[in-house]
Image (cartoon, rainbow, N blue to C red):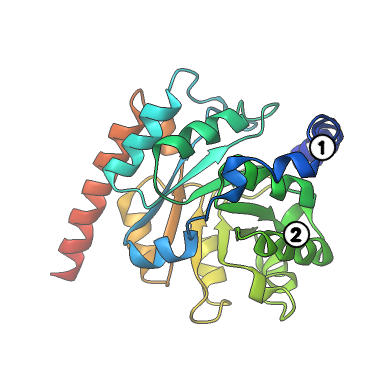
Amino acid sequence: MNILETIVARKKEELAERRAQTPVHMLEKTALFARQPYSLSQALLAGSPGIIAEFKRKSPSKGMINAKADVQETTTGYVQAGAVALSVLTDKDFFEGSDENLKIARAHNDCPILRKDFTIDPYQITEAKAIGADAILLIAAILTSEQVLQLATHAHAIGLEVLLEVHHAEELKKTALDDRIAPYIDVVGVNNRNLKTFAVDIETSVELAALMPQGMVKISESGISDPENIIRLLQHGYQGFLMGEHFMKQADPAKACGEFIQALTAGMKKKIS
């Protein structure tokens, strides 16, 4: 059983526990469920470079990244530094995340927030809206095409946007390029990490960009640590870049984000001139 299969197996157990504790009708009565979500796709199109800064304490491949960072301080610092959106991990067992972290980020930031979790059931999407998320993540590697369609349709029905994550051409073709599914996908995220070897290669984003139609909002994920990576990917039509580990491994993630965006902005100006 690989790490994704292990996570999904645990997620199914967790889902049963959560559903029993908080039924859907209770989620739908929360104040945050009633709010009008922000648009992640529009934020990416409006702001360049479109940095989605992530709050992530831990990962299965890297272990503990940052156990001390304060959620409010870090996320507000990200936005002040120029991030156009936030991503907050809510998986507890494998990433040391929590719903509470997202609620804190929501309470202190007026920008789109992606709930970063392993979504396998419509309940989790309703839950995402109830804790203040604006967009949810669907990972093609753990879902069938029919599941992607079901989950993305539900997300749109309650006003949330969908970030679909793919790792290779086959996943892209069976999901985002499927005429039934495409209308319900707001952003396509290309993850540069090979799930079998955990190796990261920016060329994955370059290769998949050529397969996507013009007008599709797309972001690159994983392994982005150099402004030159982004400058190159902008030339291939990417509007956004999800970055977490590069910032979170620093003592002051928000400061690291600010310094990166300053260097990127300077590099973009230099490229134009």
Q: Nearer the viewer, residue 244 or 98?
A: 98
Q: Quadrant of residue 109?
A: top left
**Res. 100 image quadrant:** top right
Mark 2 lies on residue: 151
Question: For the residue carrying disc 2, how many other residues have a C-alpha within 10 Å: few (<14), some (14-19), or many (20+)?
Answer: many
Rendered location of residue 13, percent (x, y)? 86, 33
Q: Which sits in the foreground, 120 or 189?
A: 120
Q: Position of residue 18 (x, y in %)?
A: 79, 33
Residue at 20% x, 66% y is 271
Task: Please identify the residue farthest to the top as the structure is shown.
Answer: 68
Examine the rendering and report whether any part of residue 161 can be seen.
yes
The percent coordinates of residue 168 (x first, y second) are: 66, 63
Q: Disc 2 or 1, which lies upstream in sequence?
A: 1
Name which residue type carries label 2: Leu
Q: Amino acid at mark 1?
A: Leu
| Secondary-structure class at tag 2 | helix
Disc on res. 15: 1
